[in-house]
Image: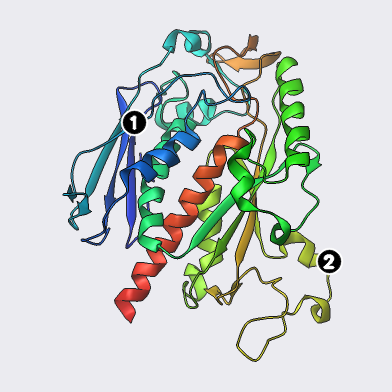
Amino acid sequence: MAGNSFGNCFKLTTFGESHGVAIGGVIDGCPAGLTLDFDAIQSELNRRKPGQSEIVTQRKEPDTVEFLSGIFDNQTTGTPIGFMIKNANQKSKDYSHIKEVYRPSHADFTYEKKYGIRDYRGGGRSSARETACRVVAGAIAKQLLKDIKINAFTSSVGDIFIDKPYQELDFSKTESNIVRCPDQASAEKMIAKIKAIRKEGDTIGGTVTCVLKNVPIGLGEPVFDKLHAELGKAMLSINAVKGFEYGSGFCGARMKGSAHNDLFNEDGTTKTNLSGGIQGGISNGMDIYFRVAFKPVATIMQKQNTINKDGKIVEMQGKGRHDPCVVPRAIPIVEAMAALVLADYYLLNKMYN
């Protein structure tokens, strides 16, 4: 299986399955001499881990990261950083009912047709549990980036949206509620929505908005390696993501150029920022902001028709512990992937300058 690595200068390779002994990764290209804050890394993992509130999966995993190499006296040595997160609370028997059937809208069917074998326990390699490895690497990338601020938050759940621009939000309030929405009035509605959907045995989707502040001018390469293209790839590689837009996004397609153009100030900043901080695929020093759409979780607790390995229509019902909405736990994953992209281009710029 290919496609287990992300990045070039700052490169992450992950390994492991949801119900295996452990998941983990290797970070290659992290510069030597970076003093690591291990509490900050674990804090990021705690934001993603299951069982943290009543509106997420109740699987209980400590998600404690163990570093195996590349660090001495709390500093990176410049060699590959190996790490591992042991799985502690698997309930593989919860998945025995799908051994011979393919769950609708899951990777079951495509994985088995492509590879001739699949680990049906929790989705195996296709499980969102793999994203814990990204959060570890992203937490280190954040410490490398220092002055760049990366803030993601829940901007919608179903048809409930924050009706304010991000400039009016206080990001320090994002962690003040279990849905991770910095607008308290919207957060209360979102939480009620998720609870109601869960009682129905169903799931709901939503969006995550991410804002990158203090990004220096010059990150990104023209043509195929545009900064926004890599951010899009990073976000679309996250489980359950169905869409990505930055700056004015799809709304910009309805505008005239005279209204959409970001006019310059004398200092090189722009009066508006419909470009989303990126022009010609290169950061221009303004805030980079983008939105990521997450579909409803495919596993629902209602009966549905599907097919088995023999191609026959059968009835199935979801079992086990699953998120009614992935968005609250996706916040640190979105931030981590953004950090990995920025770290990659930051190091690439250092090579050229």
Q: Which residue is mark 1?
A: 64
* Above or below, comparing residue 201 to residue 143 in the picture: above
> Is residue 309 or residue 39 the one in the foreground?
39
Mark 2 neighbour density, 10 Å: few (under 14) some (14–19) many (20 or more): few
Q: Which mark is residue 194?
A: none
Foreground: 237 or 282? 282
Up-down relation of residue 289 to residue 205 (above or below): below
In the image, 283: left or right of 21? right
Quadrant position of residue 321: top right
Residue at position x 56%, y 53% from top? 151
Left or right of 330: which side holds 5? Answer: left
Dot 1: element: loop
Do we see residue 2 in this rendering? no
* Disc with the residue nearer the chain's start (1 vs 2): 1
Nearer to us in this view, 200 or 40: 40
User: Mark 1 near mark 2, Cβ–Cβ under 8 Å?
Assistant: no
User: How far apart are the two marked residues, 1 and 2, measured between alpha carbons?
Assistant: 47 Å
Which disc is residue 254 wearing? 2
258 versus 33 height, above or below: below
Q: Residue at x 30, y 75 (%)?
A: 351
Amino acid tagged 2: Arg
Colouring of the image? rainbow
Q: Position of residue 149 (x, y in %)?
A: 51, 60
